[in-house]
Image (spheres, rainbow, N blue to C red):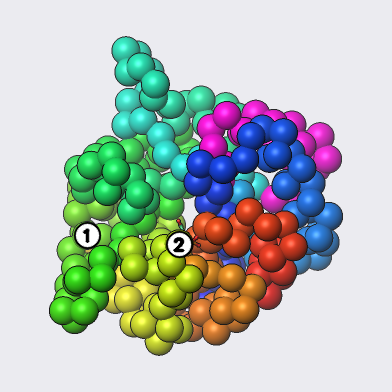
């Protein structure tokens, strides 16, 4: 992570009402003094219905935390019932938007083509897409994880210019590690994150690859973040379960 500022992103998934969200954000802030924000970017990614409340707290109390969304539509407006536009998220002050999380790929059949369209939608509205990739257990056990992730990354960034790729964050999240308590070893996380950076060199050149942030995700907690963040190509974490506990999330953010 040498010259790159780490990013810790808390993916709340489908948890927390807007009232619970207010309490959680206040609690995280209380445990994370401003001095930490010089060395780490910390963001929370709540459900859509919480974002307006989170914005009110962050703006009102001048918090250094940022926030984002878990998904967005590939379209900007119109007859897409139930969808949320990047324009709305930008207007609410979102910094990040997660794109292509494995739960969306699996339960909502999001293909790489959809991921590309959503990534472009995010960039149109000056949101930073956190583009997720990651192999399942069968691929890992077959020893094909490098080829799989390289291909999924290329598919998820297909047609993007080097300038556009430079504005993204990549999250490597092995599916077998998400929500399972089975964190990847620091070596395994580093191996794939290094392969991701090598692929970015191919797609967008050395300068972009040197600057882009690559996160690891999958059962990250306050105990294992230290080893992960110490790896050369791991620039932070996408955190699910542990991001719902203020003390743990603040502690792991402070360590990163
Ligand atoms: C995630 O869903 O992005 C994630 C990493 O979840 P968890 O930390 O709970 O494994």
Q: Residue at x 40, y 87 (%)?
A: 187
**Label 1 neighbourhood size at 10 Å, few (<14), some (14-19), many (20+)?**
some
Q: Which residue is mark 1?
A: 152
Residue 61 lies within the magenta run: yes
Label pair 1/2, CB-CB below 8 angstroms: no
Q: Is residue 223 left or right of residue 121?
A: right
Distance (Cα) linking label 1 and label 2: 21 Å
Residue 230 lies within the magenta run: no
Label 1 or label 2, whichever lies nearer to me, is 2
Image position, residue 220 (x, y; %): 53, 69
With respect to residue 216, does 74 lie above or below?
A: above
Image position, residue 206 (x, y; %): 34, 71
Check the image and name the residue furthest to the top: 79
Q: Nearer the viewer, residue 224 or 152?
A: 224
Q: Looking at the rendering, which quadrant does residue 195 occupy?
A: bottom left
Q: Residue at x 35, y 17 (%)?
A: 81
Name the secondary structure under disc 1.
Answer: helix
Name the secondary structure under disc 2.
Answer: loop
Which span of residues is magenta-colored?
45-65
Res 207 seen here: no
Badge 2 residue CB within 8 Å of ligand 1: yes
Number of numbered markers: 2
Q: Is residue 239 left or right of residue 108?
A: right
Q: Is residue 138 left or right of residue 171?
A: left
Badge 1 residue CB within 8 Å of ligand 1: no
Image position, residue 7 (x, y; %): 57, 62
Q: Nearer the viewer, residue 136 or 58?
A: 136
Q: Which residue is mark 2?
A: 179
Q: Looking at the rendering, which quadrant does residue 192 occupy?
A: bottom left
Between disc 1 and disc 2, whose residue precedes?
Answer: 1
């Amino acid at each position: 992570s040498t010259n790159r500022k780490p990013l810790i992103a808390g993916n709340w998934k489908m948890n927390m009402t807007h009232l619970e969200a207010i309490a959680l954000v206040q609690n995280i802030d209380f445990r994370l003094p401003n001095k930490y924000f010089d060395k780490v970017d910390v963001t929370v990614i709540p459900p859509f219905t919480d974002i307006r409340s989170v914005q009110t707290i962050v703006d009102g109390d001048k918090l250094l935390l940022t926030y984002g969304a878990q998904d967005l539509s590939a379209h900007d407006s119109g007859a897409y019932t139930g969808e949320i536009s990047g324009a709305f998220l930008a207007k609410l002050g979102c910094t990040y938007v997660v794109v292509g999380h494995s739960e969306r790929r699996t339960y909502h059949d999001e293909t790489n083509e959809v991921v590309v369209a959503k990534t472009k939608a995010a960039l149109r509205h000056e949101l930073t897409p956190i583009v997720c990739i990651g192999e399942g257990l069968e691929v890992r056990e077959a020893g094909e994880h490098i080829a799989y992730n390289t291909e999924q990354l290329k598919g998820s960034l297909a047609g993007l210019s080097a300038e556009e790729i430079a504005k993204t964050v990549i999250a490597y999240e092995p599916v077998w590690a998400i929500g399972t308590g089975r964190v990847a070893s620091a070596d395994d996380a580093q191996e794939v994150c290094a392969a991701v950076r090598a692929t970015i060199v191919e797609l967008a050149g050395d300068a972009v690859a040197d600057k882009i942030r690559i996160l690891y995700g999958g059962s990250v907690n306050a105990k294992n973040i230290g080893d992960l963040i110490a790896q050369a190509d791991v620039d932070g974490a996408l955190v699910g379960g542990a991001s719902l506990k203020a003390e743990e999330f603040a502690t792991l953010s402070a360590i990163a």
